[in-house]
Image (cartoon, grey):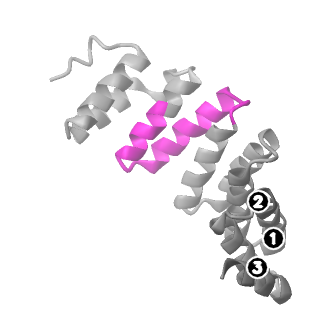
Amino acid sequence: EFNTREARSPSARLTAAQAQLALGLEAEARQTLEAMGLDSISDAPVLADAAQTYARLNDLPHAIEAMRRAAQLKRTAPELFLATARWLLDCGRAAEAAEMATEADALAPHSVEARESLGQALMATGQPAAAVRHFQSAVAFDPARTAAALGLASAAVAADQPALAREVAKKIL
């Protein structure tokens, strides 16, 4: 049993919640995370770890909130914006995902992952022509990346660019 009353700091509470989760004590881990309070945390790595812990508890709304706050605190970390974008997409919040992926892309303009995530978010918001450009960049940076190529083919079809879709499909096959 963990004494979370003694573990007052956010990082100590987070460690306790992670230990509880490792022991299969999900309800206790949730209580410990709630007691921690995301608003009290001003350390980006602790927020990112809290986000991962919430995600392990299948609590994506809190995971997204924690990761978004971590990204805002550490504006030079594209991986935080990228993780937030992916989780937002998983939750069907495509417009917000596009914003986070745009931030990741701005911080890491040659990141295949950022371009691919931005393409996925743009597709989900009904902007296939814009998605084509980002998937093309991702494929240009990493021609062997199948997910980016598949995204490009799908975006090309949706953007009424059948010649591009066929060209990409031939390369995939």
Q: Residue 65 colored magenta?
A: yes
Q: Which residue is mark 1?
A: 132
Q: CA distance from mark 3 to mark 1?
A: 11 Å
Give the alpha-carbon distance from disc 3 to disc 2, as whole Å.
13 Å
Residue at left offset 54%, top offset 52%: 87
Per the image, label 2 sits on a secondary structure element best described as helix
Q: Residue 132, percent across and down?
A: 81, 70
Q: Is residue 87 left or right of residue 23?
A: right
Question: In this rendering, which labeled residue sits more in front, label 3 or label 1?
Answer: 3
The tag on residue 84 is none
Spot occupied by residue 71 in the image (x, y as percentages of width and height): 64, 34
**Tag 3 residue:** 168
Q: Nearer the viewer, residue 97 or 156?
A: 156
Q: Which amino acid, by three-letter code, is at mark 2?
A: Ala
Please tell me how crowded label 1 is: few (under 14), some (14-19), or many (20+) other residues with Cα within 10 Å.
Answer: many
Where does the image place residue 93, in percent across and percent down from the top left? 60, 59
Q: Position of residue 139 (x, y in %)?
A: 76, 64
In the picture, residue 78 is in which quadrant?
top right
Mark 3 / mark 1, whichever is N-terminal: 1
Q: Residue furthest left?
A: 1
From which residue to which does the magenta span run?
A: 49-77
- Asked whether residue 131 is drawn in magenta, I would say no
The main secondary structure of the magenta stretch is helix
Q: Is residue 80 above or below residue 94?
A: above
Assess disc 3: are there few (<14), some (14-19) or many (≥20) residues with their C-alpha within 10 Å of its C-alpha: many
Q: Residue at x 74, y 64 (%)?
A: 143
Q: Vertically, is 96 above or below 6?
A: below
Kindly identify which numbered label has been placed on residue 138. 2
